[in-house]
Image (spheres, rainbow, N blue to C red):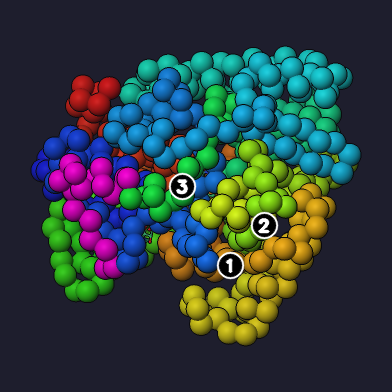
Amino acid sequence: MRNPVEGKDIIVIGSGIGGLSAGILLSLLDFHVTIVEKNPLPGGLMRSYSRSGLDCPVGVHYVGALGADEPLGKMFHVLGIPVEELFTPMGRDGIIDRYIFDDLTFDLPVGLDAMEARLRDASPLDRAALDVIMKNLREISRQMKAPSFLFSQENPFQNMDYYQPMGELLDSLDASAGLRSVLAVPCNLIGVPLNDCPVIFHHMVLASYLFSSWQLKEGGSRMTDVFVKRFESLGGKLLLNDGVKKISTREGRTTGVVLESGATLSADGIIAAIHPKILLGLLEENALREMHRRRIRGLRETEGVIAVQVSVDAALHPAIHHNIYRLHRDEKGVIQDGIFYQLRGGSRADTNHLSILTRSLYSDWRPWEHTVTGKRGHDYEEKKMTIAGDLLKKAEEIFGNLSDARILDVYTPLTIRDYVNAPEGACYGIMRSSRQLLKAMSLNNLPIGGLCLAGQNAMAPGVMGCLFGAFNAVRQITGAGKFAERIG
Ligand SMILES: Cc1cc2nc3c(=O)[nH]c(=O)nc-3n(C[C@H](O)[C@H](O)[C@H](O)COP(=O)(O)OP(=O)(O)OC[C@H]3O[C@@H](n4cnc5c(N)ncnc54)[C@H](O)[C@@H]3O)c2cc1C
Protein backbone atom coordinates (compact mmCIF):
# COMPACT_ATOMS: atom_id res chain seq x y z
CA MET A 1 0.00 0.00 0.00
CA ARG A 2 1.33 3.43 -0.90
CA ASN A 3 0.88 5.31 2.39
CA PRO A 4 -0.55 4.88 5.84
CA VAL A 5 -4.16 6.08 5.95
CA GLU A 6 -4.82 9.65 7.16
CA GLY A 7 -8.44 9.34 8.36
CA LYS A 8 -10.19 6.97 10.73
CA ASP A 9 -12.94 5.31 8.64
CA ILE A 10 -12.04 1.85 7.40
CA ILE A 11 -14.09 -0.70 5.49
CA VAL A 12 -13.12 -4.36 5.70
CA ILE A 13 -14.50 -6.54 2.90
CA GLY A 14 -15.24 -10.08 4.12
CA SER A 15 -16.00 -11.37 7.62
CA GLY A 16 -13.83 -14.52 7.58
CA ILE A 17 -11.21 -14.89 10.29
CA GLY A 18 -8.92 -12.57 8.30
CA GLY A 19 -11.48 -9.76 8.07
CA LEU A 20 -12.73 -10.09 11.64
CA SER A 21 -9.18 -10.11 13.06
CA ALA A 22 -8.24 -7.01 11.06
CA GLY A 23 -11.50 -5.35 12.22
CA ILE A 24 -10.76 -6.10 15.89
CA LEU A 25 -7.16 -4.84 15.66
CA LEU A 26 -8.21 -1.61 13.92
CA SER A 27 -10.97 -1.05 16.49
CA LEU A 28 -8.40 -1.48 19.26
CA LEU A 29 -6.46 1.33 17.58
CA ASP A 30 -9.53 3.63 17.63
CA PHE A 31 -10.45 3.33 13.96
CA HIS A 32 -14.14 3.30 12.97
CA VAL A 33 -14.54 -0.01 11.20
CA THR A 34 -17.35 -1.45 9.13
CA ILE A 35 -17.03 -5.05 7.98
CA VAL A 36 -19.11 -5.83 4.91
CA GLU A 37 -20.10 -9.46 4.27
CA LYS A 38 -22.01 -10.84 1.29
CA ASN A 39 -23.42 -13.82 3.21
CA PRO A 40 -26.34 -13.67 5.67
CA LEU A 41 -24.04 -15.07 8.40
CA PRO A 42 -20.49 -13.99 9.28
CA GLY A 43 -17.34 -16.14 9.60
CA GLY A 44 -16.60 -17.40 6.06
CA LEU A 45 -14.63 -20.65 6.23
CA MET A 46 -14.23 -20.37 10.02
CA ARG A 47 -17.98 -20.89 10.44
CA SER A 48 -19.39 -24.40 10.93
CA TYR A 49 -22.90 -25.54 10.02
CA SER A 50 -25.38 -27.86 11.63
CA ARG A 51 -26.81 -31.11 10.23
CA SER A 52 -29.12 -33.33 12.33
CA GLY A 53 -27.93 -31.50 15.44
CA LEU A 54 -24.22 -32.11 14.71
CA ASP A 55 -21.82 -29.23 14.21
CA CYS A 56 -19.97 -29.74 10.91
CA PRO A 57 -16.61 -27.96 10.50
CA VAL A 58 -15.53 -26.31 7.26
CA GLY A 59 -12.17 -24.54 7.62
CA VAL A 60 -11.03 -25.11 11.22
CA HIS A 61 -10.18 -28.75 12.04
CA TYR A 62 -7.09 -28.11 14.11
CA VAL A 63 -4.67 -25.25 14.67
CA GLY A 64 -1.16 -24.97 16.07
CA ALA A 65 0.84 -22.55 18.23
CA LEU A 66 -1.97 -21.33 20.48
CA GLY A 67 0.11 -21.58 23.67
CA ALA A 68 0.64 -18.35 25.61
CA ASP A 69 4.26 -17.89 24.38
CA GLU A 70 3.56 -19.13 20.85
CA PRO A 71 2.77 -16.92 17.84
CA LEU A 72 -0.95 -17.66 17.40
CA GLY A 73 -1.57 -17.57 21.16
CA LYS A 74 0.12 -14.17 21.34
CA MET A 75 -1.97 -12.83 18.46
CA PHE A 76 -5.20 -14.11 20.08
CA HIS A 77 -4.07 -12.37 23.28
CA VAL A 78 -3.60 -9.06 21.46
CA LEU A 79 -7.08 -9.40 19.91
CA GLY A 80 -8.60 -10.25 23.29
CA ILE A 81 -9.91 -13.66 22.13
CA PRO A 82 -9.91 -16.23 24.97
CA VAL A 83 -8.09 -19.39 23.82
CA GLU A 84 -9.27 -21.70 26.64
CA GLU A 85 -12.89 -20.80 26.05
CA LEU A 86 -12.73 -21.90 22.42
CA PHE A 87 -10.04 -24.57 22.13
CA THR A 88 -8.87 -27.75 23.81
CA PRO A 89 -5.29 -29.11 23.44
CA MET A 90 -4.77 -32.22 21.31
CA GLY A 91 -2.18 -34.91 21.93
CA ARG A 92 -3.45 -36.28 25.22
CA ASP A 93 -2.63 -39.74 23.83
CA GLY A 94 0.82 -38.38 22.87
CA ILE A 95 -0.08 -38.04 19.19
CA ILE A 96 -1.28 -35.13 17.08
CA ASP A 97 -1.49 -36.90 13.71
CA ARG A 98 -1.18 -40.52 12.60
CA TYR A 99 0.13 -40.86 9.02
CA ILE A 100 -0.74 -44.30 7.61
CA PHE A 101 1.14 -45.33 4.45
CA ASP A 102 0.92 -48.84 2.93
CA ASP A 103 4.23 -49.86 4.51
CA LEU A 104 4.76 -47.35 7.31
CA THR A 105 2.80 -45.67 10.09
CA PHE A 106 4.23 -42.52 11.59
CA ASP A 107 2.78 -40.85 14.68
CA LEU A 108 3.49 -37.14 14.90
CA PRO A 109 4.06 -36.42 18.60
CA VAL A 110 3.82 -33.15 20.50
CA GLY A 111 7.13 -31.28 20.66
CA LEU A 112 10.20 -30.86 18.48
CA ASP A 113 12.45 -33.13 20.56
CA ALA A 114 9.89 -35.93 20.52
CA MET A 115 9.47 -35.59 16.76
CA GLU A 116 13.24 -35.66 16.19
CA ALA A 117 13.58 -38.81 18.29
CA ARG A 118 10.76 -40.51 16.40
CA LEU A 119 12.13 -39.51 12.98
CA ARG A 120 15.63 -40.71 13.88
CA ASP A 121 14.13 -43.95 15.05
CA ALA A 122 12.02 -44.42 11.91
CA SER A 123 14.79 -43.31 9.50
CA PRO A 124 18.20 -44.27 10.94
CA LEU A 125 19.90 -43.90 7.55
CA ASP A 126 18.80 -40.26 7.28
CA ARG A 127 21.08 -39.05 10.08
CA ALA A 128 22.87 -36.35 8.06
CA ALA A 129 19.64 -35.09 6.44
CA LEU A 130 17.94 -34.91 9.81
CA ASP A 131 20.87 -32.95 11.29
CA VAL A 132 20.25 -30.20 8.72
CA ILE A 133 16.45 -30.28 8.88
CA MET A 134 16.30 -30.23 12.68
CA LYS A 135 18.82 -27.37 12.84
CA ASN A 136 16.67 -25.29 10.45
CA LEU A 137 13.46 -26.24 12.26
CA ARG A 138 14.90 -25.24 15.62
CA GLU A 139 16.19 -21.93 14.26
CA ILE A 140 12.81 -21.09 12.69
CA SER A 141 10.95 -22.16 15.86
CA ARG A 142 13.21 -19.90 17.94
CA GLN A 143 12.51 -16.94 15.65
CA MET A 144 8.76 -17.65 15.68
CA LYS A 145 8.75 -17.29 19.45
CA ALA A 146 10.81 -14.08 19.49
CA PRO A 147 8.76 -10.90 20.18
CA SER A 148 10.13 -9.28 17.01
CA PHE A 149 8.45 -12.00 14.91
CA LEU A 150 5.02 -10.40 15.23
CA PHE A 151 5.82 -6.80 15.78
CA SER A 152 8.84 -5.91 13.69
CA GLN A 153 8.48 -4.97 10.04
CA GLU A 154 11.76 -6.68 9.20
CA ASN A 155 11.58 -10.17 7.70
CA PRO A 156 13.28 -12.33 10.37
CA PHE A 157 14.08 -15.00 7.78
CA GLN A 158 16.89 -13.50 5.71
CA ASN A 159 18.50 -16.87 4.99
CA MET A 160 17.80 -17.38 1.26
CA ASP A 161 18.06 -21.17 1.67
CA TYR A 162 14.69 -21.03 3.44
CA TYR A 163 13.02 -20.03 0.16
CA GLN A 164 14.16 -23.03 -1.86
CA PRO A 165 11.57 -25.78 -2.36
CA MET A 166 11.50 -28.41 0.37
CA GLY A 167 11.77 -31.18 -2.28
CA GLU A 168 14.98 -29.62 -3.62
CA LEU A 169 16.46 -29.46 -0.11
CA LEU A 170 15.59 -33.11 0.49
CA ASP A 171 17.18 -34.04 -2.88
CA SER A 172 20.39 -32.26 -1.92
CA LEU A 173 20.40 -34.10 1.41
CA ASP A 174 19.78 -37.43 -0.32
CA ALA A 175 16.79 -38.04 1.96
CA SER A 176 15.10 -41.44 1.87
CA ALA A 177 11.62 -41.91 0.37
CA GLY A 178 10.26 -42.63 3.88
CA LEU A 179 11.55 -39.36 5.36
CA ARG A 180 10.42 -37.43 2.31
CA SER A 181 6.85 -38.73 2.54
CA VAL A 182 6.54 -38.02 6.28
CA LEU A 183 7.86 -34.49 5.77
CA ALA A 184 5.51 -33.92 2.84
CA VAL A 185 2.39 -33.82 5.02
CA PRO A 186 2.78 -30.24 6.38
CA CYS A 187 2.96 -29.02 2.75
CA ASN A 188 -0.50 -30.55 2.19
CA LEU A 189 -1.81 -28.41 5.04
CA ILE A 190 -1.20 -25.29 2.98
CA GLY A 191 -2.04 -26.88 -0.34
CA VAL A 192 1.44 -26.86 -1.91
CA PRO A 193 3.24 -29.95 -3.28
CA LEU A 194 6.50 -30.85 -1.48
CA ASN A 195 8.57 -30.17 -4.59
CA ASP A 196 7.29 -26.61 -4.80
CA CYS A 197 6.78 -25.72 -1.12
CA PRO A 198 9.27 -23.16 0.25
CA VAL A 199 11.24 -24.54 3.22
CA ILE A 200 10.13 -21.59 5.34
CA PHE A 201 6.39 -22.33 4.95
CA HIS A 202 6.92 -26.03 5.53
CA HIS A 203 8.93 -25.43 8.70
CA MET A 204 6.56 -22.76 10.04
CA VAL A 205 3.53 -25.03 9.61
CA LEU A 206 5.29 -28.04 11.13
CA ALA A 207 6.79 -26.01 13.99
CA SER A 208 3.44 -24.44 14.84
CA TYR A 209 1.72 -27.83 15.23
CA LEU A 210 4.69 -29.21 17.20
CA PHE A 211 4.58 -26.26 19.63
CA SER A 212 1.03 -27.26 20.51
CA SER A 213 -2.04 -28.47 18.59
CA TRP A 214 -5.62 -27.58 19.38
CA GLN A 215 -9.16 -28.54 18.40
CA LEU A 216 -12.25 -26.43 18.77
CA LYS A 217 -14.34 -27.27 21.85
CA GLU A 218 -17.71 -26.47 20.34
CA GLY A 219 -17.25 -25.53 16.71
CA GLY A 220 -16.62 -22.83 14.17
CA SER A 221 -19.93 -21.04 14.65
CA ARG A 222 -19.17 -20.49 18.31
CA MET A 223 -15.67 -19.29 17.37
CA THR A 224 -17.23 -16.87 14.91
CA ASP A 225 -19.65 -15.60 17.57
CA VAL A 226 -16.73 -14.86 19.92
CA PHE A 227 -14.85 -12.93 17.20
CA VAL A 228 -17.98 -10.97 16.21
CA LYS A 229 -18.85 -10.16 19.81
CA ARG A 230 -15.32 -8.91 20.46
CA PHE A 231 -15.42 -6.75 17.31
CA GLU A 232 -18.82 -5.27 18.15
CA SER A 233 -17.87 -4.66 21.78
CA LEU A 234 -15.09 -2.39 20.49
CA GLY A 235 -17.61 -0.35 18.48
CA GLY A 236 -17.19 -2.14 15.12
CA LYS A 237 -20.14 -2.43 12.72
CA LEU A 238 -20.94 -5.61 10.80
CA LEU A 239 -23.08 -5.37 7.65
CA LEU A 240 -24.39 -8.75 6.51
CA ASN A 241 -26.08 -10.04 3.38
CA ASP A 242 -24.88 -7.19 1.19
CA GLY A 243 -21.66 -7.81 -0.73
CA VAL A 244 -19.32 -5.21 -2.15
CA LYS A 245 -19.98 -4.71 -5.87
CA LYS A 246 -17.42 -2.01 -6.58
CA ILE A 247 -14.49 -0.24 -4.94
CA SER A 248 -14.39 3.46 -5.81
CA THR A 249 -11.06 5.24 -6.33
CA ARG A 250 -10.05 8.81 -7.06
CA GLU A 251 -6.57 9.92 -8.11
CA GLY A 252 -5.05 6.61 -7.18
CA ARG A 253 -6.65 6.32 -3.72
CA THR A 254 -9.67 4.42 -2.50
CA THR A 255 -12.69 6.49 -1.51
CA GLY A 256 -15.28 3.85 -0.59
CA VAL A 257 -17.44 1.03 -1.86
CA VAL A 258 -20.73 0.43 -3.65
CA LEU A 259 -22.74 -2.50 -2.28
CA GLU A 260 -24.94 -4.99 -4.15
CA SER A 261 -27.99 -3.23 -2.67
CA GLY A 262 -26.86 0.03 -4.29
CA ALA A 263 -25.89 1.62 -0.98
CA THR A 264 -22.58 3.50 -0.94
CA LEU A 265 -20.12 3.75 1.94
CA SER A 266 -17.18 6.12 2.01
CA ALA A 267 -13.90 5.22 3.68
CA ASP A 268 -10.36 6.46 4.18
CA GLY A 269 -8.99 2.97 3.77
CA ILE A 270 -10.13 -0.48 2.68
CA ILE A 271 -8.89 -3.90 3.75
CA ALA A 272 -9.94 -6.56 1.27
CA ALA A 273 -10.02 -9.83 3.23
CA ILE A 274 -11.10 -11.69 0.09
CA HIS A 275 -9.46 -13.48 -2.82
CA PRO A 276 -7.29 -11.16 -5.00
CA LYS A 277 -9.06 -12.26 -8.20
CA ILE A 278 -12.39 -11.26 -6.63
CA LEU A 279 -10.82 -7.96 -5.54
CA LEU A 280 -9.72 -7.39 -9.14
CA GLY A 281 -13.33 -7.72 -10.29
CA LEU A 282 -14.40 -5.00 -7.81
CA LEU A 283 -11.90 -2.44 -9.13
CA GLU A 284 -12.51 -0.08 -12.02
CA GLU A 285 -10.75 -1.20 -15.20
CA ASN A 286 -8.15 1.60 -15.05
CA ALA A 287 -7.45 1.40 -11.30
CA LEU A 288 -4.63 -1.11 -11.85
CA ARG A 289 -2.17 -1.31 -14.73
CA GLU A 290 -2.63 -4.23 -17.14
CA MET A 291 0.67 -5.73 -15.90
CA HIS A 292 -0.74 -5.99 -12.36
CA ARG A 293 -4.07 -7.32 -13.57
CA ARG A 294 -2.36 -10.01 -15.62
CA ARG A 295 -0.18 -10.98 -12.67
CA ILE A 296 -3.21 -11.45 -10.41
CA ARG A 297 -5.26 -13.27 -13.05
CA GLY A 298 -2.34 -15.66 -13.65
CA LEU A 299 -1.94 -16.72 -10.01
CA ARG A 300 -2.25 -20.48 -9.55
CA GLU A 301 -4.83 -21.68 -7.02
CA THR A 302 -4.53 -24.39 -4.38
CA GLU A 303 -6.72 -27.44 -4.94
CA GLY A 304 -10.22 -28.01 -3.64
CA VAL A 305 -11.59 -30.83 -1.53
CA ILE A 306 -14.64 -33.01 -1.26
CA ALA A 307 -15.74 -33.34 2.37
CA VAL A 308 -18.10 -35.93 3.80
CA GLN A 309 -19.71 -35.30 7.20
CA VAL A 310 -20.82 -38.52 8.89
CA SER A 311 -22.55 -39.33 12.17
CA VAL A 312 -21.55 -42.60 13.90
CA ASP A 313 -22.68 -44.46 16.98
CA ALA A 314 -20.54 -43.12 19.84
CA ALA A 315 -20.53 -46.48 21.66
CA LEU A 316 -19.12 -48.28 18.59
CA HIS A 317 -16.76 -45.49 17.49
CA PRO A 318 -15.37 -43.49 20.42
CA ALA A 319 -13.74 -40.14 19.71
CA ILE A 320 -10.05 -40.24 18.70
CA HIS A 321 -7.87 -37.44 20.04
CA HIS A 322 -5.58 -37.26 17.03
CA ASN A 323 -6.14 -36.85 13.30
CA ILE A 324 -5.60 -39.69 10.88
CA TYR A 325 -4.12 -39.34 7.40
CA ARG A 326 -4.32 -42.34 5.06
CA LEU A 327 -1.67 -41.64 2.43
CA HIS A 328 -0.35 -43.20 -0.75
CA ARG A 329 3.13 -42.40 -2.00
CA ASP A 330 5.27 -43.34 -4.97
CA GLU A 331 8.69 -45.01 -4.75
CA LYS A 332 10.37 -41.59 -4.38
CA GLY A 333 8.20 -40.71 -1.40
CA VAL A 334 6.01 -38.22 -3.27
CA ILE A 335 2.46 -38.34 -1.88
CA GLN A 336 0.06 -39.24 -4.67
CA ASP A 337 -3.19 -38.92 -2.75
CA GLY A 338 -4.49 -38.91 0.76
CA ILE A 339 -7.57 -38.84 2.95
CA PHE A 340 -7.89 -36.88 6.19
CA TYR A 341 -10.09 -38.24 9.00
CA GLN A 342 -11.17 -36.61 12.21
CA LEU A 343 -13.45 -38.55 14.58
CA ARG A 344 -14.64 -36.33 17.40
CA GLY A 345 -17.34 -36.07 20.02
CA GLY A 346 -20.65 -34.81 18.71
CA SER A 347 -23.01 -32.40 20.42
CA ARG A 348 -25.17 -35.46 21.37
CA ALA A 349 -23.85 -38.06 23.83
CA ASP A 350 -24.88 -41.06 21.69
CA THR A 351 -23.42 -39.77 18.43
CA ASN A 352 -19.88 -38.97 17.28
CA HIS A 353 -18.87 -37.09 14.20
CA LEU A 354 -16.51 -38.30 11.49
CA SER A 355 -15.18 -35.79 8.95
CA ILE A 356 -13.58 -37.22 5.81
CA LEU A 357 -11.73 -34.90 3.44
CA THR A 358 -9.83 -35.59 0.27
CA ARG A 359 -8.56 -33.69 -2.75
CA SER A 360 -11.09 -32.96 -5.48
CA LEU A 361 -10.14 -31.25 -8.72
CA TYR A 362 -12.23 -28.32 -9.88
CA SER A 363 -12.11 -29.72 -13.42
CA ASP A 364 -14.02 -32.82 -12.20
CA TRP A 365 -16.99 -30.55 -11.44
CA ARG A 366 -16.78 -28.50 -14.63
CA PRO A 367 -20.18 -29.74 -15.99
CA TRP A 368 -21.86 -27.91 -13.08
CA GLU A 369 -19.60 -24.85 -13.19
CA HIS A 370 -22.47 -22.53 -14.09
CA THR A 371 -24.91 -23.79 -11.45
CA VAL A 372 -25.48 -22.50 -7.93
CA THR A 373 -25.63 -24.28 -4.56
CA GLY A 374 -28.87 -26.23 -4.05
CA LYS A 375 -29.72 -26.12 -7.77
CA ARG A 376 -27.06 -28.25 -9.38
CA GLY A 377 -29.40 -31.07 -10.33
CA HIS A 378 -29.69 -34.83 -9.98
CA ASP A 379 -26.46 -35.82 -11.79
CA TYR A 380 -24.38 -33.66 -9.48
CA GLU A 381 -26.06 -35.08 -6.37
CA GLU A 382 -25.54 -38.59 -7.68
CA LYS A 383 -21.83 -38.05 -8.41
CA LYS A 384 -21.31 -36.43 -5.02
CA MET A 385 -23.06 -39.24 -3.13
CA THR A 386 -21.23 -41.97 -5.08
CA ILE A 387 -17.87 -40.47 -4.13
CA ALA A 388 -19.07 -40.05 -0.52
CA GLY A 389 -20.21 -43.71 -0.39
CA ASP A 390 -16.81 -44.88 -1.72
CA LEU A 391 -15.00 -42.74 0.86
CA LEU A 392 -17.12 -44.17 3.65
CA LYS A 393 -16.35 -47.69 2.47
CA LYS A 394 -12.61 -46.91 2.47
CA ALA A 395 -12.94 -45.48 5.99
CA GLU A 396 -13.82 -48.99 7.20
CA GLU A 397 -10.12 -49.92 6.68
CA ILE A 398 -9.39 -47.55 9.56
CA PHE A 399 -12.50 -47.53 11.74
CA GLY A 400 -13.89 -51.03 11.20
CA ASN A 401 -17.49 -51.74 10.29
CA LEU A 402 -19.37 -48.50 9.62
CA SER A 403 -22.83 -49.87 8.91
CA ASP A 404 -24.12 -47.61 11.71
CA ALA A 405 -22.78 -44.52 9.91
CA ARG A 406 -25.05 -41.95 8.30
CA ILE A 407 -23.87 -39.41 5.75
CA LEU A 408 -25.11 -36.00 6.89
CA ASP A 409 -23.68 -33.78 4.21
CA VAL A 410 -21.17 -33.63 1.36
CA TYR A 411 -19.56 -30.51 -0.05
CA THR A 412 -17.40 -30.04 -3.13
CA PRO A 413 -15.11 -27.33 -4.54
CA LEU A 414 -18.20 -25.73 -6.11
CA THR A 415 -19.77 -25.36 -2.63
CA ILE A 416 -16.69 -23.56 -1.30
CA ARG A 417 -16.44 -21.46 -4.46
CA ASP A 418 -19.96 -20.11 -4.09
CA TYR A 419 -19.94 -19.86 -0.31
CA VAL A 420 -16.92 -17.57 0.09
CA ASN A 421 -16.13 -16.44 -3.48
CA ALA A 422 -13.07 -18.66 -3.79
CA PRO A 423 -12.11 -19.13 -7.47
CA GLU A 424 -12.06 -22.86 -8.33
CA GLY A 425 -13.11 -23.62 -4.75
CA ALA A 426 -9.47 -23.30 -3.67
CA CYS A 427 -9.21 -24.34 -0.01
CA TYR A 428 -6.17 -22.26 0.82
CA GLY A 429 -6.50 -19.48 -1.76
CA ILE A 430 -3.56 -18.84 -4.07
CA MET A 431 -0.70 -21.31 -3.97
CA ARG A 432 2.28 -20.24 -1.83
CA SER A 433 4.73 -22.12 -4.00
CA SER A 434 8.39 -21.25 -4.56
CA ARG A 435 7.47 -20.72 -8.20
CA GLN A 436 5.03 -17.87 -7.56
CA LEU A 437 6.40 -16.60 -4.26
CA LEU A 438 7.37 -13.16 -5.57
CA LYS A 439 4.06 -12.69 -7.43
CA ALA A 440 2.17 -13.66 -4.26
CA MET A 441 4.28 -11.33 -2.12
CA SER A 442 3.65 -8.42 -4.47
CA LEU A 443 -0.03 -8.55 -3.47
CA ASN A 444 1.05 -6.91 -0.22
CA ASN A 445 2.07 -3.79 -2.05
CA LEU A 446 -0.99 -2.90 -4.11
CA PRO A 447 -0.37 0.33 -6.01
CA ILE A 448 -3.65 1.94 -4.88
CA GLY A 449 -3.53 4.32 -1.92
CA GLY A 450 -5.55 3.16 1.09
CA LEU A 451 -6.12 -0.40 -0.21
CA CYS A 452 -4.54 -3.53 1.17
CA LEU A 453 -5.19 -7.25 1.21
CA ALA A 454 -5.78 -9.45 4.26
CA GLY A 455 -7.08 -12.99 4.78
CA GLN A 456 -5.43 -16.18 3.65
CA ASN A 457 -4.20 -14.68 0.37
CA ALA A 458 -2.13 -11.95 2.00
CA MET A 459 0.68 -13.70 3.86
CA ALA A 460 -0.20 -17.38 4.35
CA PRO A 461 -3.29 -19.59 4.65
CA GLY A 462 -4.82 -21.18 7.74
CA VAL A 463 -5.86 -19.58 10.98
CA MET A 464 -2.28 -18.56 11.83
CA GLY A 465 -1.61 -17.23 8.33
CA CYS A 466 -4.81 -15.16 8.42
CA LEU A 467 -3.84 -13.61 11.74
CA PHE A 468 -0.40 -12.69 10.33
CA GLY A 469 -2.15 -11.21 7.31
CA ALA A 470 -4.44 -9.13 9.56
CA PHE A 471 -1.49 -7.84 11.61
CA ASN A 472 0.36 -6.95 8.41
CA ALA A 473 -2.64 -5.18 6.83
CA VAL A 474 -3.24 -3.10 9.95
CA ARG A 475 0.47 -2.24 10.08
CA GLN A 476 0.10 -0.87 6.55
CA ILE A 477 -2.95 1.20 7.50
CA THR A 478 -1.39 2.72 10.63
CA GLY A 479 2.23 2.89 9.49
CA ALA A 480 4.89 0.65 10.99
CA GLY A 481 5.99 3.10 13.72
CA LYS A 482 2.55 3.62 15.18
CA PHE A 483 1.76 -0.08 14.93
CA ALA A 484 4.90 -1.04 16.87
CA GLU A 485 4.21 1.64 19.48
CA ARG A 486 0.54 0.75 20.06
CA ILE A 487 0.38 -3.00 19.41
CA GLY A 488 3.98 -4.15 19.99
C1 LIG B 1 -11.96 -27.66 3.87
C2 LIG B 1 -10.98 -26.75 4.56
C3 LIG B 1 -10.32 -27.19 5.69
C4 LIG B 1 -9.44 -26.34 6.36
N1 LIG B 1 -8.87 -26.76 7.53
C5 LIG B 1 -8.07 -25.90 8.23
C6 LIG B 1 -7.56 -26.26 9.50
O1 LIG B 1 -7.83 -27.34 10.02
N2 LIG B 1 -6.75 -25.37 10.15
C7 LIG B 1 -6.42 -24.15 9.62
O2 LIG B 1 -5.69 -23.36 10.25
N3 LIG B 1 -6.93 -23.78 8.41
C8 LIG B 1 -7.73 -24.61 7.71
N4 LIG B 1 -8.26 -24.22 6.51
C9 LIG B 1 -7.92 -22.89 5.98
C10 LIG B 1 -8.66 -21.78 6.70
O3 LIG B 1 -10.00 -22.17 6.89
C11 LIG B 1 -8.62 -20.51 5.88
O4 LIG B 1 -7.26 -20.18 5.64
C12 LIG B 1 -9.28 -19.31 6.56
O5 LIG B 1 -10.49 -19.63 7.18
C13 LIG B 1 -9.53 -18.24 5.49
O6 LIG B 1 -10.07 -17.09 6.09
P1 LIG B 1 -10.22 -15.76 5.23
O7 LIG B 1 -10.72 -14.72 6.16
O8 LIG B 1 -9.00 -15.48 4.45
O9 LIG B 1 -11.29 -16.11 4.10
P2 LIG B 1 -12.79 -16.63 4.14
O10 LIG B 1 -13.07 -17.40 5.33
O11 LIG B 1 -12.98 -17.25 2.80
O12 LIG B 1 -13.62 -15.28 4.23
C14 LIG B 1 -13.82 -14.42 3.15
C15 LIG B 1 -15.18 -13.79 3.37
O13 LIG B 1 -15.36 -12.76 2.40
C16 LIG B 1 -16.70 -12.83 1.93
N5 LIG B 1 -16.75 -12.17 0.63
C17 LIG B 1 -16.24 -12.60 -0.55
N6 LIG B 1 -16.48 -11.70 -1.52
C18 LIG B 1 -17.15 -10.68 -0.94
C19 LIG B 1 -17.68 -9.44 -1.43
N7 LIG B 1 -17.57 -9.07 -2.71
N8 LIG B 1 -18.31 -8.63 -0.54
C20 LIG B 1 -18.43 -8.97 0.77
N9 LIG B 1 -17.98 -10.14 1.27
C21 LIG B 1 -17.32 -10.97 0.42
C22 LIG B 1 -17.00 -14.31 1.90
O14 LIG B 1 -18.39 -14.56 1.89
C23 LIG B 1 -16.32 -14.77 3.20
O15 LIG B 1 -17.19 -14.71 4.30
C24 LIG B 1 -9.16 -25.04 5.84
C25 LIG B 1 -9.83 -24.61 4.69
C26 LIG B 1 -10.75 -25.44 4.06
C27 LIG B 1 -11.49 -24.94 2.85
User: Distance between the Cα atoms at labels 3 and 1?
Assistant: 19 Å
Q: Which residue, given by chain and number where applicable, does mark 2 sit on?
A: 313
- What crowding class fits label 3: few (fewer than 14 Cα within 10 Å), some (14-19), or many (20 or more)? some
> How far across and how far down the image is residue 139, in percent?
56, 16
Left or right of residue 368, residue 109 in this image: right
Pinpoint residue 277: horizontal percent, then vertical percent.
Answer: 42, 59
Residue 371, compared with residue 42, is above or below; it is below
Amino acid type, residue under disc 2 in the picture: Asp
N-term-proximal mark, 1 vs 2: 2
* Classed neighbour count for the residue bearing mark 1: other residues with Cα under 10 Å, few (<14), some (14–19), many (≥20): some
The residue most toward the left is: 7
User: Amino acid type of disc 1?
Assistant: Asp
Range shown magenta: 226-243
Q: Can residue 228 be seen in this view?
A: yes
Q: Which residue is drawn at 26% across and 47% down?
A: 229
- Residue at horizontal 33 percent and vertical 36 percent from the top: 81
Q: Tell me the mark number nearer the camera, choosing from 3 and 1.
A: 3
As drawn, 202 above or below 382: above
Quadrant including the N terminus: top left
In the rendered image, residue 240 lying in the magenta stretch gets the answer yes
Compared with 426, 141 (above or below) is above
Of tags 2 and 3, the one toward the viewer is 2
Front of the two marks 1 and 2: 2
As measured in the structure, the alpha-carbon distance from the residue carrying label 1 to the one carrying label 2 is 17 Å
Front-lying residue, 204 or 255:
204
Q: Which of 337 and 47 is in front in this view?
A: 47
Q: Mark 3 points at which residue?
A: 218
Residue extending farthest to the bottom is 378
Horizontal and vertical percent position of residue 101: 82, 42
> Badge 1 is on which residue?
409
